[in-house]
Image (cartoon, rainbow, N blue to C red):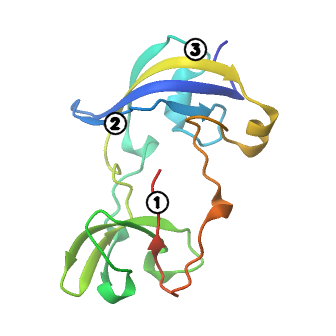
Amino acid sequence: MKIAKNTVVTVHYKLSDAQGTLIEDGQEPMVYLHGGYENTLPKIEEALEGKAAGFDITIQVEPEDAFGEYDADLVKVEERKNLPTPLEVGMQFEGTPDGDDDGDALVFTVTDVADDKVVLDGNHPLAGMALRFSLNVADVRAATDEEIAHGHVHGAHGHHDDEDDEDEDESGNEYRSHPIH
């Protein structure tokens, strides 16, 4: 079967930077619903369109087609008292830039903790980087009607991000812990 809209694609992948330094060696394959459902980068879908199991390719994706350019305006300094404890570098929280409750929520990563201040970075960790994806198509199958209706894969190794399952933040703080998949 060839990769087309509404097929479920299983891809083994390795992710490196433009210099070839390994960033992620996909221990588990990526399984996604193909066809513009935003389950993977559009450039990956473009490279795999019409291919079949066994296809190998390495593609380079520029920042504007991956995780965007680095935006210094998304780096904030926050009072430590506004964030939960314990707090350490690398922790991630969901919040809105500049406290704008009408804006889209971003994931902020704690990049520095000093005395009563915390530095939060709302950029994706791979923002501003050209990325190389080594892709090997392991399997292609027709998606189920339910997967198509929900816009994502169900079952083993499929990414399932059910927005309705989020815990509400009762503390009144602008940020809340956010697990990253």
**Is residue 170 placed above or below 70 in the rendered structure?**
below
Which secondary structure lies at badge 1?
Answer: loop
Q: CA distance from mark 3 to mark 2?
A: 21 Å
> Which residue matches tag 3?
51
Q: Nearer the viewer, mark 2 or mark 1?
A: 1
Secondary-structure class at tag 3: loop
- Mark 2: give few (<14), some (14-19) or many (20+) Cα within 10 Å: many
Q: At x 21% / y 34%, what residue is drawn?
A: 21
Q: How many marks?
A: 3
Tell me if label 3 and label 1 are in contact, CB under 8 Å: no
Q: Quadrant of the N terminus?
A: top right
Q: Residue 142: x percent and y percent? A: 72, 23
What residue sits 56% from the left and 80% below the top? 101
What residue type is disc 3 on? Lys
Q: Which one is nearer the viewer's eye here, 90 or 131?
A: 90
Q: Residues within 10 Å of mark 3 (few under 14, many from 20)?
A: some
**Residue 179: which disc?**
1
Mark 2, secondary structure of its residue:
strand
Q: Which residue is mark 2?
A: 131
For the point 56% across and 84% down, the residue is 170
